[in-house]
Amino acid sequence: MKFLSQISVAKRLALGFALVLLLSVIVIALSIARLNALADATEEMVQNPIKTERLVSDWARNLHTGITRTAAVARSADPVLAEFFAEDSKASSKSSGELQKGVEALMFADSEKKIFGEIGALRAVYLKNRDTIFTLKKDGKVDEANALLETQFLPDAKRYAAKMDELQRNQREQVDQLGRAIQENRQSSRRLLTVLGVLSVALGALFSWILARSVTVPLAQASHLAKRVAAGDLTVSAAAHGKDEVGELMASLDLMQTNLANVVSKVRTGSESVANASSEIAQGNSDLSARTEHQASALEQTAASMEELNSAVRNNADNARQANQLALTASQVATQGGTVVGEVVETMKGINEASRKISDIISVIDSIAFQTNILALNAAVEAARAGEQGRGFAVVASEVRSLAGRSAEAAKEIKGLINASVERVERGTSLVDKAGETMNEVVTSIRRVTDIMGEISAASSEQSAGVAQVGEAVTSMDQATQQNAALVEEMAAAASSLRTQSHELVQVVAVFQLSADQARQFTGQATAAPQRTASHAPSPAVRRAQAPAPSLAGKGANAQPVRKTAPALAASPQPASRPGSGGNDDQWESF
């Protein structure tokens, strides 16, 4: 047991499992060896004696069938019976020859070889007599065949069959001997494996009991020590116990007992300091509550002002959106007007082109009238030369010339009117072009105005959203301030209950019993610690002022944690281990 206490529990368990596994391996190895021996013996019996016995049995069966067949052929009066059994006799002889070769290959003992040699000689005589009987039967010599059957064939065949039976009995005896050997091997293997199994179980149980005792006894001692400490007796100490995990546990329990005694001593001394600090915290919380209420009132006024500003900015944003809609409508109307003016310009250009074509046509008509006048003049000259015969033609030429003159005059007047119309159309086209350019400038200006109004509307919307966020932030600050006020009131209540709890704490730790040495050792340390803490720790108000204020941007999302903190502080007030010097107004100005 002492040796095991110097080894770790993990190594002990590993050693136990290793022993069990070693025993299991030994048992399994012996089982496999015995099974292999049985398998080898069985395989040897199957491969040699049983196979030989089966071959000899088949050979003997062929022999008896052949003797019966030959006797039937010899004694039968049917002349064709020999021919009928001829093929069967040949097949039987061939099969017996193959069986003889197979048996010869498996003969190893001298006694077996001797019997096998005698069988071979008798088989040769048997085959000779059988073939002679079949020949005599085919030749019709029935009497001679019967005589040969009775005098030679049957006596030789009986000796041949007797030797075969002797060989078969010999093979069966070998099979029985191997079977008995295999059975004896199986019985001895079973006895050996049973003994080894019982031995391995006994050794495993013994080692398991030793391992269990090496762990449970020290654990019982550790449990007894823990129960003594739980009962409040801190004077008990743990004895050294080995280098394993249980020994480490005992050392840890001893260290725990020492540290717990230290804690109890310090708690007894520090509870008085907690009571003094709680009164100072209560005074500081009263001042903090008054300032918090004042700040909450100011934040409520600020929130109301931000609500009015938010309403005004929202109205401006609505007006900007309406102006933006009107500007968009005006831009659409101006665009449509520009499109119509463009169509008018195109129409005026078409009229101008048509007027120019009409002027060209009138010029052609004027040219035709001029050519007609010349032709009429030539006709009149020719009529004057003709005299009386051309007088009528001269009259016609005169009328044609008169009409050509009037046509030329009319064409000149129409041409003048058309030229005047073309000039007016060109002036109208120029004016329409200018009107189109002016309309395009109007559309461009209206679009710029529309863009500016859109930007104004977007800026107003962003401004409205920003003011809304500022309002929400102020509202969140108001809520946080109100929660802080409630929290301060809860802290005041907690400080008043802290003193009561400190007295209860002294009574609670009084249940622990300390030895005189422990009391003297830890009392000095416990009394020095609060003095050093009080001389260097800042007041609670100053420490709160040094902490960065939480950001309330982002729609007041940080107000929720304040609400969650208040109940926690109210339910579990923390004792002030570092009291300040007082609750004067100078220390609270930083809040």
Image (tube, rainbow, N blue to C red):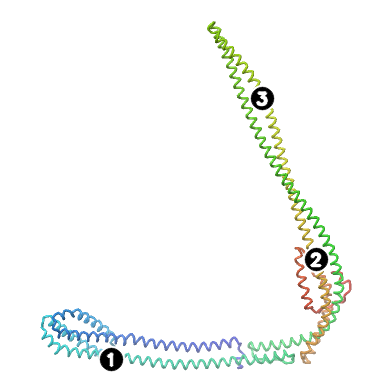
Residue corresponding to mark 1: 170
Question: Which badge, 2 or 3, is on the more N-terminal residue?
Answer: 3
Distance from label 1 to label 2 (Cα)?
116 Å
Q: Position of residue 484 (x, y in %)?
A: 81, 71
Q: Indicate which label's residue lies in the foreground, 2 or 3.
A: 3
Instruction: Find out whether the residues at labels 2 and 3 contact each other: C-beta distance under 8 Å.
Output: no
Instruction: Find out whether the residues at labels 1 and 2 contact each other: C-beta distance under 8 Å.
Output: no
Q: Amino acid at mark 2?
A: Met
Q: Please, is residue 53 above or below residue 322 in the view?
A: below
Residue occupying image coordinates x 63% and y 27%? 356
Residue occupying image coordinates x 10% and y 83%? 141
Q: Secondary structure at mark 2?
A: helix
Residue corresponding to mark 2: 477
Q: Residues within 10 Å of mark 2 (few under 14, many from 20)?
A: many
On-image quarter of the C terminus: bottom right
Q: Amino acid at mark 3?
A: Asn
Q: Residues within 10 Å of mark 1 (few under 14, many from 20)?
A: some
Q: Please, is residue 552 above or below residue 183 in the view?
A: above
Residue 525 seen from this side = no
Residue 440 figure quarter: top right
Q: Indicate which label's residue lies in the foreground, 1 or 2.
A: 2
Q: Which mark is residue 419?
A: 3
Residue occupying image coordinates x 55% and y 11%? 379
Q: Position of residue 177 (x, y in %)?
A: 33, 92
